[in-house]
Image: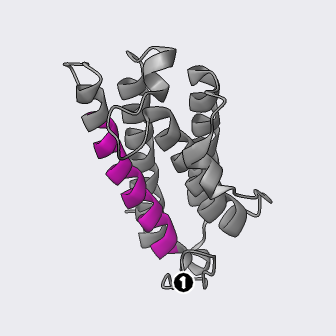
Amino acid sequence: MENLQTTIASGLAERYGTLASRVRELAAPLAQEQFWIKPFPFGNSFGHLVLHLTGNLNYYIGAQIAGTGYVRDRDLEFTETRHLPKEEVLQSFDEAIAMVLRTVRAQSAEDWIAAYNAVGAENVANRFQMVLRCAAHLDHHVGQMIYLGFALGRAEA
């Protein structure tokens, strides 16, 4: 029988893995140009959303829990003009997901309830709440990516 710590870690790892796979699946049919197109006067491109999710995970989980030293430039996540290669952006996202999975699996029961403090997360009390919030944030943006896929003419989104 699993204990609560193992249940939390395995449940979160499964969810992050599922969401990461969905990002890859949605990105796969997009050409490099489509990856960076903003089909609406509001909102973001698929590529900018991936940059944003990568920065979010690397900051809130990597820097603040795993101690990676990551320094975030949140504004650049939405304004990057270099249109980096799609595969390079997705590889960075995959690396952030791998770091999240390692971090989640390394948390003890005491770690999960440890106080959490970061800019932009002032009302988050502990590590569990932040990791859960990041999963919800990722899920939210996957929904936007599905919509972008339809807007970019991908019928199977």
Query: Percent position (x, y) of residue 102?
Result: 63, 51
In the image, residue 133 sits, relative to residue 146, either above or below, namely below
- The quadrant of the image that shows the C terminus is top left
Q: Residue at x 64, y 26 (%)?
A: 84
Q: Residue at x 43, y 67 (%)?
A: 133
Label the magenta part by its dominant secondary structure.
helix
Q: Is residue 66 left or right of residue 138?
A: right
Instruction: Check disc 1 and give the amino acid type.
Output: Glu
Q: Residue furthest right?
A: 69
Q: Residue at x 48, y 17 (%)?
A: 33
- The quadrant of the image that shows the N terminus is bottom left
Query: Percent position (x, y) of residue 42?
Result: 35, 46
Q: Is residue 96 magenta?
A: no
Q: Which colouring convention does the figure follow?
A: one colour
Magenta-highlighted residues:
128-146
Q: Is residue 140 left or right of residue 47?
A: left
Image label count:
1
Residue 120 in sight: yes
Kind of element beneath mark 1: loop
In the image, residue 74 sits, relative to residue 85, either above or below, namely below
Residue under pointer 1? 122
Q: Residue furthest front?
A: 41
In the image, residue 108 sits, relative to residue 91, either above or below, namely below
Query: Percent position (x, y) of residue 48?
Result: 51, 40
In the image, residue 30 sits, relative to residue 80, either above or below, namely above
Query: Percent position (x, y) of residue 99?
Result: 64, 48
Q: Residue furthest left?
A: 155
* Image quadrant assignment for residue 112: bottom right
Residue 54 in sight: no
